[in-house]
Amino acid sequence: MGKPVTRSHSLPLHEPSSPPLSTTTSSKISFQSRKIRKLPTNKTTTTTTAITSTSIPPLKPLSHKGEIELALDHLSKSDPLLAPLLNSHEPPALNPCTSPFLSLTKSILFQQLATNAAKSIYTRFLTLCDGESQVNPDTVLSLSAPKLREIGVSGRKASYLHDLAEKYRNGSLSDSSILEMNDDMLLNRLTEVKGIGVWSVHMFMLFSLHRPDVLPVGDLGVRKGVQSLYGLKDLPQALEMEQICEKWKPYRSVGSWYMWRLMEAKALANKAAKKA
């Protein structure tokens, strides 16, 4: 990547606390259609296909040693417009994910809430569970909807938490299977959980699992960042986002992270200009 850039501190990978503020919900994002070749419907083919789709290992998580450096090198070479942004902002620092179940539970609790309100409810939830180490499917299922409502969790969110916990208990999901699934399979399986849409899965894959090639095409901040970086007249839609950010592969997660940093920098600049 040429002369290395000196970065004295790494910034934490902050996760947006709510879905994109757009008229289209993340669960209804349209993706580019793909032609699917029909295969013979025999038992052997079906079994082989199922094994193949779940056994393809994902790329190394960004939390692996050296992966962030590889991502920055690739992005600076593949996208001349992105390169200056990489040099002017610190790289992301990744916090370890101790439990996918805990992360998904937290994601549900934080949905559609202001950060301070969500943190307050989450703190009370942890008290009910006797700490983060005790947030597991059995504990969550033991908390009735009325009990959860006492700490500020809506009845709808209580049903989401119970559905997630039940899918863990019946074996449909597990921490180990989540870590082994590729991105497409994970998206399909997690959106089967009530209350978890495409945007939530993208955030989970990016911030909890540190998957390297996540492009959250429904996130308003990322879309605005792409619009600003490339000087687009209108906010890019899902297909346009895929096309524009193709060059970032296989590190679209890091490119997306810098779109948030770009928009934060612009907001600070606008605020300073108003004060002046």
Image: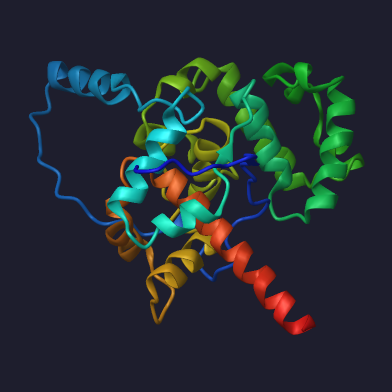
Q: Quadrant of the N terminus?
A: top left
* Colour mapping: rainbow
Say above or below: 261 vs 129: below
The answer, for residue 183, to whether it is visible in the render is yes
Return the x and y of residue 162 as percentages of the image width and height: 68, 31
Q: Does 34 sit left or right of 54 as displayed?
A: left
Say above or below: 209 vs 153: above
Return the x and y of residue 153 as percentages of the image width and height: 81, 44
Query: How many callouts does the rendering have?
Result: 0
Q: Does 215 sit left or right of 42 as displayed?
A: right
Say above or below: 170 vs 1: above
Q: Quadrant of the C terminus?
A: bottom right
Q: Nearer the viewer, residue 90 or 12?
A: 90
The answer, for residue 189, to whether it is visible in the render is no
Residue 160's image quarter?
top right
Q: Does 253 sit left or right of 73 as displayed?
A: right
* Residue shown at the point (14%, 16%) measured from the top left: 44
* Residue shown at the point (79%, 22%) measured from the top left: 142
Return the x and y of residue 98 as percentages of the image width and height: 64, 20
Return the x and y of residue 203 as percentages of the image width and height: 55, 44
* Residue shown at the point (38%, 77%) measured from the top left: 232
Q: Nearer the viewer, residue 79 or 88?
A: 88
* Residue shown at the point (30%, 19%) measured from the top left: 55
